[in-house]
Image (cartoon, rainbow, N blue to C red):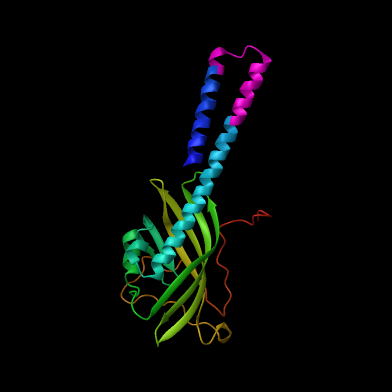
Amino acid sequence: MRNRLFRSLLTIVLCCVSFGNCKQGFSSPADKDLGAQLKKLQAQVEELERRVGRAEDFVALSNLEDAYGYYVDKCQWDQAADLFAKDGRLEIAGRGVYIGQDRVRAYLHHLPRFQYGQVFNHMQLQPVITVEPDGNSAKARWRAVIQAGVLNKSAQWGEGTYENEYVKENGVWKFKSLHFFVTYYIDYDKGWDKGGNAPPAPIKGFPPDQPPSVDYKTFPDVFIPPYHYKNPVTGK
């Protein structure tokens, strides 16, 4: 808040001085130099505002993704669904695409309830976030590490990659598209050297709005989810 106030005051001061300068006219080379310096300072302030905005977007998008992970951990499906835009999309593994916040909510409510003896952790890690120049849309790649188990019944590790899209609605970031590519699900006591288990199966009686957008196989097969970004060094 203090930084915002400082930037706002600085901008106002610069504008006032610039206006006064313009009103009086540039009567000497010194006045022209001052005018050029003011324009340069204004440009620097605008650039700083842009950078601060991008930094704030990075934090907000990180918080959005992390909040999703925490809500999914505890099967708080309505809380998770509220993070999606009205036309948001969700695609998990090969279950197909669910379109619209209401359909996303219905899909989530077809998943298990959080209860005694259940672990359902989804850790959101390793973000690469790209905010578009307009500041109203973004994409991000994340890694999820999953612990899923039921007491005396099963215990699994899971891992996969998100390639997500986001949109800012009324100044608030929301999911436009959440797409999770499963790398593997494996039994805790066996490990991945024994191969992976089948990915989550389509939900019986609740078909998706569209079939899976990408056809791929999980571990031990090899698949690299498409990157939304270019190499930050080579630009390729």
Residue 91, percent from left and from top:
43, 66
The answer to whether one can see residue 215 in this image is no
At horizontal 48% and vertical 60% (from top left) the residue drawn is 164
Number of numbered labels in the structure image: 0
Task: From the top left corner, tell me how far across and down residue 116 is, in percent.
Answer: 34, 79
Q: Is residue 154 above or below residue 1?
A: below
Left or right: 37 as drawn, with respect to 189? right
Res 104 seen here: yes
User: Taking 169 as reference, is 44 above or below it?
Assistant: above
The main secondary structure of the magenta stretch is: helix
Q: Is residue 110 left or right of residue 176?
A: left
- Is residue 124 shown in magenta? no
- On the image, the x and y values in percent for residue 217 come to 52, 76
Magenta stretch bounds: 21-41
What is the quadrant of residue 89 in the picture? bottom left
- Between 214 and 61, the one lying in front of the other is 61
User: Residue placed at 49% from the left, 45% from the top?
Assistant: 135
- Asked whether 94 or 111 is in front, the reply is 111
Residue 211 vs 184, above or below: the answer is: above
Q: Residue at x 46, y 42 (%)?
A: 1
Q: Give the answer, above or below, for where 107 lies relative to 155.
A: above
The quadrant the C terminus occupies is bottom right
Q: Give the residue displayed 46% in from the left and 62% down from the top.
A: 66
From this viewpoint, which residue is outermost toward the front?
2
Give the x, y percent position of residue 207.
34, 71
Magenta highlight on residue 32: yes
Image quarter for residue 113?
A: bottom left
